[in-house]
Image (cartoon, grey):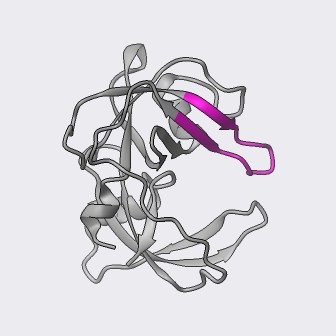
């Protein structure tokens, strides 16, 4: 799958209001009007508690690779799994309050039995990089929290942008085969 097709599904979540402004993280389209992201990203965007009940306020987002780049849209929390004491959870599904742009769509999803050592690409939004940073890495094994460990690909020449993307800014962004 080409980067353009995959990137069309990427969403940026924005912080607005009294807590400041700016991009706080990403997500991706999983249905015609549904976005998957992390609960902590939504909480950061609207000033909510990622360990508490589902927030009720609107979430501001945009589609950075769609035809309406920069046009802010609203969504509401549709499903919420807060961060649990054991580290599980941290999942949010958002429902758009208006239709997504026509060129934004869900990428093909597939179940893979063995992820070990498969290479992936990710477009994330670490702090200060609202335009996004592409990173690469490899899938590793599952953990007790049912999350998968990812190993960032090391660069011969380390750039601040590349190393930052490997450490943060990508938890809710989609991964696709490299």
Relative to 98, is 165 above or below? below
Position of 72 with respect to 60 (left or right) is left
Q: Can the viewer see residue 160 in this picture?
A: no
Numbered range of the magenta stretch: 77-94
Residue 122 part of the magenta segment: no
Viewer-proximal residue among 100 and 43: 100
Position of 41 with respect to 84 (left or right) is left
Residue appearing at x 40%, y 78% in the figure:
153
- Expressed as whole percent of the image width and height from the top left, the position of residue 24 reads 40, 38
Q: Can the viewer see residue 114 in this picture?
A: yes
Viewer-proximal residue among 138 and 156: 138
Image quarter of the C terminus: bottom left
- Expressed as whole percent of the image width and height from the top left, the position of residue 59 reads 46, 26
- Expressed as whole percent of the image width and height from the top left, the position of residue 148 reads 64, 68
**Residue most extreme to the top:** 18
Residue 85 part of the magenta segment: yes
Relative to 77, is 155 above or below? below
Query: On the image, which quarter does residue 167 sit in?
Result: bottom left
- Expressed as whole percent of the image width and height from the top left, the position of residue 106 reads 43, 54
Residue appearing at x 35%, y 68% in the figure:
135
Viewer-proximal residue among 7 and 23: 7
Residue appearing at x 53%, y 46% in the figure:
36
Position of 24 with respect to 109 (left or right) is left
Residue appearing at x 28%, y 67% in the figure:
3
Image quarter of the N terminus: bottom left
């Amino acid at each position: 799958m080409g980067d353009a097709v995959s990137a069309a599904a990427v969403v940026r979540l924005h912080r607005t209001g009294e807590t400041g402004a700016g991009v706080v993280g990403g997500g991706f389209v999983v249905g015609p009007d549904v976005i998957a992201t992390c609960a902590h990203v939504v909480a950061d965007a609207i000033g909510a508690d990622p360990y508490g009940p589902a927030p009720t306020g609107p979430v501001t987002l945009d589609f950075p690779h769609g035809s309406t780049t920069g046009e802010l849209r609203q969504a509401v929390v549709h499903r919420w799994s807060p961060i649990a004491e054991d580290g599980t959870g941290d999942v949010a599904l958002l429902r758009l309050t208006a239709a997504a742009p026509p060129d934004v769509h869900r990428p093909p999803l597939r179940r893979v039995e063995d992820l070990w050592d498969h290479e992936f690409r990710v477009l994330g939004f670490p702090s200060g990089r609202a335009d996004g940073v592409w990173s690469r890495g490899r899938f590793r094994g599952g953990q007790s929290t049912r999350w998968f460990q990812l190993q960032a690909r090391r660069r011969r020449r380390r750039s601040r942008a590349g190393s930052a993307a490997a450490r943060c800014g990508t938890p809710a962004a989609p991964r696709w085969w490299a």
